[in-house]
Image (tube, rainbow, N blue to C red):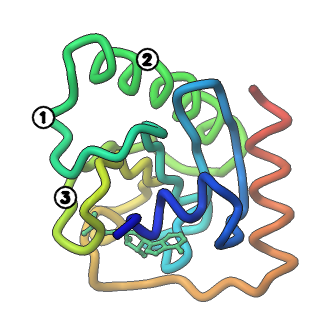
Amino acid sequence: MASIFTKIISGEIPCYKVAETEDYLAFLDINPNAKGHTLCIPKAEVDKIFDLEEVAFHGLMAFSRQVAIAVEKAVPCKRVGMTVIGLEVPHAHVHLIPLNTMEDARFINKTKLDREEFEAIAARIASFL
Ligand code: AMP
C-alpha cells in the first residue's frame, strides 16, 4: 500500500508545499514541533533513509540543506535542526525544525496552527528558495 507521503506526492492527499524538484518534495509537518517545521522526502518510496541509494541519499541531503537555509531566513529562530526518525511514516523523510530551545527538538510539545498560518509560512519559506 502506498505510504501517506506517496499519496501526498500524487496529490491524493493535500499538503502545504514548500519546494519540489523532479526527485524530492518539501512540505510542512501537519503536527509541528514549531512553526515552520518542514519535511523533506524523496519521491521514490523507500522506508528507511539509510536504505536509499547513495545518490538519492546525497540528493535528499542537498535538497534538505537548500530548504533549511530558506526556513532559517523565513522563521525567527536560533537555528534549524535536522532530525530523522521515521517511526510513524515508513517513507524516508528529514525533519527540519526551527529551534529556539532544546524543547523544540523534542517531539512532545506541539504547536497548533490554523490553515491560514500553514499557508502563510509555506509561502514565506518558498519565497526564500
Ligand atoms: P516520524 O515517522 O516519526 O518521523 O514522524 C512522521 C511525521 O510526519 C510526524 O511529525 C507527523 O506529524 C508527520 N505527518 C504525518 N502525516 C502527515 C501529513 N499528512 N502531512 C504532513 N505531515 C504529516
First in sequence: mark 3 or mark 2?
Answer: 2
Q: Which residue is mark 2?
A: 62
First in sequence: mark 1 or mark 3?
Answer: 1
How far apart, in angstroms, are the residues tagged by discs 3 and 2?
18 Å
Q: Nearer the viewer, residue 73 or 113?
A: 113
The answer to whether mark 3 is within 8 Å of ligand 1 is yes
The N terminus sits in image quarter: bottom left
Q: Position of residue 47 (x, y in %)?
A: 21, 52
Relative to 110, 47 lies left or right: left
Amino acid type, mark 3: Ile
Q: Secondary structure at mark 1?
A: helix
Amino acid type, mark 1: Asp
Mark 1: few/some/many CA within 10 Å (<14, 14-19, 20+): few
Q: Which mark, residue 51?
A: 1
Amino acid type, mark 2: Ala
Residue 106 versus residue 102 in the image, above or below: below
